[in-house]
Image: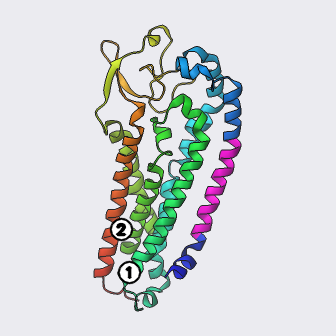
Amino acid sequence: MIWVTWRQHRGQAIACLAVLAALAVYAIIEGTSMRSAFSSDGLAGSCLARTQGIGCENGIGAFMDKFGTVVNISFWSVALIVPGLIGVLVGGSLIARESEYGTWRLAWSQSVPRARWLAVKLGLVTGGLIVLGAAMTAVITWYRAPMDRLTGRMQHNVFDFEGLVLTAYILCAFGFAVLAGLLIRRSIPAMIAAFIPWLAIRLIVEFVFRDQFLAPLTTAMAASCHTQAGCGSGIGVVPQSVLPQSTGRIGDLVLGSKPGNLVSYQPADRFWPFQFIEAGIFVALAAAALGATILLLRRRAAWSA
């Protein structure tokens, strides 16, 4: 089973490794440049640690003008759908290809029960996707490290690629695609049918529910915000050269202002609780889809020719 699974999915494995290699090359080139600029502008020293960016506006402005759009907007826009694409490309053909090529007649007539056949394939492929997701997360976390010092990791364009959620996104799309492949029995339609709900759920969770995973806190607007032209809102991408957030602390996700110079926010130290909550949602969806697949496969009669 291990050999057969490798033979069937080695092309996808090589493609995933190519994606990881391309990401690593890009991260090394852009990340090294970003690190050099971060150090040469003096941002890595006492300025951020002691003044939360208030004492080094010029350096922050120059750094954000150079890297802010590429790292915070362009990268997020391009990579937004990548986890879903990886998941559906791998999962869409896992069962559907057996129908398209007619190989289910051989695969399901052996001494290995079809449920065990599927469980082994799912275990091996899922393990590979977890390793891939963890590797991609490590590369992106290293790449973004200097920018994270300025924006924190609670911003929507950062949160999606660090911690646990990127791997969970891949697994969820994979689970949807495997189930769609069983029901539709054609790889490409199954990929499309899985990707659309994955993307819808992904966007709804990110922009509707994520900010409310835990009850927001309220605090007085930082005193420096009354004297500056403005303070970072914390929503999406921190405005160019405007730090810290209106809570007075870099990394907080500000949700909005309230009467009396109050702001509603999610503190930066909730990054990991939020990661576990969101990753849990997508892993649960993946487990439900894969569980339904195994159950349906056990009950389904052999496909007709």
Rendered image quadrant of residue 168: bottom left
Q: What residue type is labelled 2?
A: Leu
Q: Which amino acid does label 1 sit on?
A: Arg
Disc 2 secondary structure class: helix
Q: Percent x, y for residue 286? A: 37, 61
Residue at image position (34%, 63%) is: 287
For label 2, the residue is: 290
Circle on res. 116:
1
Mark 2 surroundings within 10 Å by alpha-carbon count, few (fewer than 14), some (14 through 19), many (20 or more): many
Q: In this view, does 152 lie above or below 77?
A: above
Disc 1 secondary structure class: helix
**Badge count:** 2
- 298 or 222: nearer the eye? 222
Q: Percent x, y for residue 15? A: 61, 64
Q: Percent x, y for residue 135? A: 56, 54
The quarter of the rendered structure image containing the C terminus is: bottom left
Q: How far apart are marks 2 and 1 (CA)?
A: 13 Å
Kindly tell me whether residue 211 is visible in this rendering: yes
Residue at image position (49%, 82%) is: 1
- Tell which circle, 2 or 1, labels the residue nearer the N-terminal end: 1
Kindly tell me whether residue 187 is visible in this rendering: no
The reply to whether the magenta stretch includes residue 206 is no
| Residue range of the region highlighted in magenta in the rendering | 12-30
Q: Is residue 304 left or right of residue 239?
A: left
Q: Is residue 71 above or below residue 85?
A: above
